């Protein structure tokens, strides 16, 4: 039965919401903390033998018959999974982003989708600033130069970078993480402007100025930091045209999702000297990185470490487990991003 089709989807949703008790929870990866142990005390936990990433038919086969599924951002959850799991109630993603899950298919199948907001905000904002500082002050490049024997003594013109005072930081996406990045800017003397669909309440803006047009924001940003989710609308939001709207010598920092930037266009804008550098934590074809980035000394490349503190990762796992426990107990999970329609 195609779970996207009307009657089948309704029957599935009613079935999913009608059964309580001990459930089967398929989990694609071990998680930090003791959340999985707590979960195993209540439900039957099925761990993937090799771990994330798991996608498509393989994920469907692994999850078949499960009542709940816990996924990482590298797992791709599509209609095949919902078809294989007629009793599935929830996909609990251990990430704030959930672009790896087909939300329409989940909704049609009557399945909750949850994410892990808030608990990773500060960690990700910290890492954004680590990239801003690293790329403008050539921190990683300097480390490499020193280890390669290139530090032969202090010189007034050695490895000069860009100071931050009075520079303009442009933030695209003033959600939780964008706002946390803006809050940190005051200490560096940076002026902050942001673009979003609508302005945030002044008490959340941390003094940042709203710019209604994205192109206008770009034209005045010495450093651009991306904090927008990956959706069909934001794919390649930063394309060749927009990259060249940035002032010459500007820096691009991305800790959101790789798909938001046209990576080939970014490489071209670095190669033609338009950009001063880039600090990246995420990639368009993650974990693959555009080869044009790898050899450059004006880019800092991190392996998706935005939320990588023990505190944040344990908290993310805990939020995901709480979501599963709630959904399997017939309650509304704490952090839903897809709410199934009520059964008819
Ligand atoms: C998320 O949760 O979406 C982050 O990218 C993980 O670091």
Image (cartoon, rainbow, N blue to C red):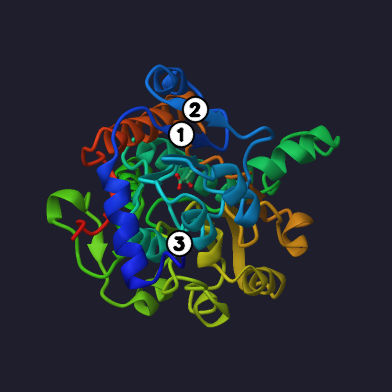
What residue sits right under mark 3 in the picture? 102
Q: Of marks 3 and 1, which one's residue comes earlier in the chain?
A: 1
Q: Of marks 2 and 1, which one's residue comes earlier in the chain?
A: 1
Q: Nearer the viewer, residue 294 or 272?
A: 294
Task: Give coordinates of residue 174: x percent, y percent.
Answer: 30, 57
**Up-down relation of residue 104 to residue 93 (above or below):** below
Q: Quadrant of residue 220?
A: bottom left
Task: Give coordinates of residue 327: x percent, y percent.
Answer: 29, 38
Q: Give the Cα separation between the discs numbered 3 and 1.
A: 19 Å
Label 1 element class: strand
Q: Give the Cα separation between the discs numbered 2 and 1.
A: 5 Å
The reply to whether callout 2 and callout 1 are in contact (CB within 8 Å) is: yes
Label 2 element class: strand
**Up-down relation of residue 197 to residue 78 (above or below):** below
* Residue located 31% across and 29% down the image: 21
Which of the image's four quarters has the C terminus? bottom left
Q: Of marks 3 and 2, which one's residue comes earlier in the chain?
A: 2
* Residue located 31% across and 39% down the image: 118
What residue sits right under mark 2 in the picture? 45
Q: Quadrant of residue 13?
A: bottom left
Q: Does mark 3's beta carbon lie closer than 8 Å to ligand 1?
A: no
* Residue located 38% across and 72% down the image: 5
* Residue located 57% across and 28% down the image: 30
The reply to whether callout 3 and callout 1 are in contact (CB within 8 Å) is: no
Q: Nearer the viewer, residue 108 or 334?
A: 108
What residue sits right under mark 1 in the picture? 25
């Amino acid at each position: 039965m195609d779970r996207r089709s009307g009657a089948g989807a309704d029957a599935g949703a009613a079935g999913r919401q009608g059964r309580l008790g001990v459930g089967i929870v398929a989990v694609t990866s071990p998680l930090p903390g003791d959340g999985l142990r707590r979960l195993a005390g209540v439900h039957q936990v099925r761990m993937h033998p090799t771990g994330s990433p798991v996608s498509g038919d393989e994920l469907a086969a692994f999850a078949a018959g499960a009542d709940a599924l816990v996924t990482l951002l590298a797992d791709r959850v599509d209609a095949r999974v919902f078809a294989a799991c007629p009793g599935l109630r929830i996909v609990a993603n251990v990430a704030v982003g959930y672009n790896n899950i087909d939300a329409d298919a989940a909704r049609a199948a009557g399945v909750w989708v949850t994410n892990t907001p808030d608990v990773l905000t500060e960690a990700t904002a910290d890492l954004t600033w680590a990239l801003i500082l690293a790329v403008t002050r050539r921190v990683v490049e300097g480390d490499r130069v020193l280890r390669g024997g290139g530090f032969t003594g202090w010189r007034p013109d050695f490895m000069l970078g860009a100071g931050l005072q009075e520079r303009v930081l442009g933030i695209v996406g003033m959600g939780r993480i964008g706002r946390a990045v803006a809050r940190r800017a005051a200490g560096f003397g940076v002026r902050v402007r942001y673009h979003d669909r609508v302005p945030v309440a002044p008490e959340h803006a941390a003094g940042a100025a709203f710019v209604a047009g994205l192109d206008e924001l770009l034209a005045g940003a010495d450093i651009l930091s991306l904090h927008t989710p990956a959706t069909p609308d934001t794919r390649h939001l930063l394309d060749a045209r927009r990259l060249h709207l940035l002032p010459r010598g500007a820096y691009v920092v991305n800790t959101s999702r790789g798909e938001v930037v046209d990576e080939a266009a970014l490489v071209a804008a670095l190669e033609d000297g338009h950009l001063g550098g880039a600090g990246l934590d995420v990639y368009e074809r993650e974990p693959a990185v555009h080869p044009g980035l790898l050899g450059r000394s004006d880019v800092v490349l991190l392996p998706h470490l935005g939320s990588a503190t023990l505190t944040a990762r344990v908290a993310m796992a805990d939020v995901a487990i709480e979501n599963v426990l709630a959904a399997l107990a017939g309650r509304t999970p704490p952090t839903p991003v897809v709410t199934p329609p009520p059964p008819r």
